[in-house]
Image (spheres, rainbow, N blue to C red):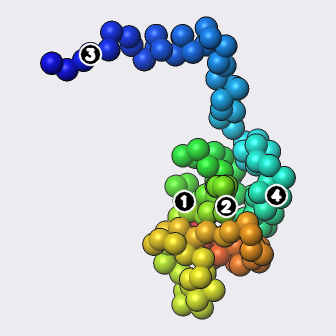
Amino acid sequence: MAHRCSRTRSQWARQALDEGERVGERQAATPTTIDDYVAGFPDGPREVLEQVCEALRRAVPGGEEKIRYGMPAIMFADRYGIHFAGWKKHVGLYPVGELDADLEAEVAPHRTTKDTVRFLYAEPVPYDLIERLARRLAAKHAA
């Protein structure tokens, strides 16, 4: 016979709060701006994320900045944009689809899947490449 738990998820959550666990102590509030998102990282990754963000802002001047899918995004068309996210060991850019052969050759060492480009914090991050990449994607979707 299967064991059935008599407590609901909300009852477990209430008990955790009653025992002193606060949501903010375990997990920061969901950021609502790109700057809030970046500010939530430790110094090293935060500096890289700030520079990535600046490269994207230069590439897409006037692009709408928002948080989409829990990640910062710089929008360059109604539905299209470039997202970036900080992880434990790298920063990722999404989605980075098909590129011209010359740019793809530069991006290829950093590509991990069809639409993902990853830059490790432990290696020099090519901010100029990120800027050119974002410009090319913005131009592609503007056409």
Q: Is residue 106 left or right of residue 127?
A: left
Q: Residues within 10 Å of mark 4 (few under 14, many from 20)?
A: few
Q: CA distance from mark 1 to mark 3?
A: 46 Å
Dividing the picture into quadrants, the one containing residue 82 is bottom right
94 vs 19, nearest the viewer: 19
Mark 2 or 4, nearer chain start:
4
Seen in the picture, residue 38 relative to 21 is either above or below; the reply is below
Q: Residues within 10 Å of mark 1 (few under 14, many from 20)?
A: some
Q: CA distance from mark 1 to mark 4?
A: 29 Å
Q: Which residue is mark 4?
A: 44
Q: Secondary structure at mark 1?
A: loop
Say which amino acid is labelled 3: Arg
Task: Check the image and name the residue furthest to the bottom.
Answer: 102
Q: Which residue is mark 3?
A: 4
Residue occupying the point 52% across, 55% down: 79
Which percent across, then down, holds residue 34? 73, 47
Which percent across, then down, holds residue 33? 72, 42
Say which amino acid is labelled 4: Gly
Q: Residues within 10 Å of mark 3 (few under 14, many from 20)?
A: few
Which percent across, then down, holds residue 65? 69, 50
Frontmost of labels 3 and 2 is 3
Q: Which mark is residue 80?
A: 1
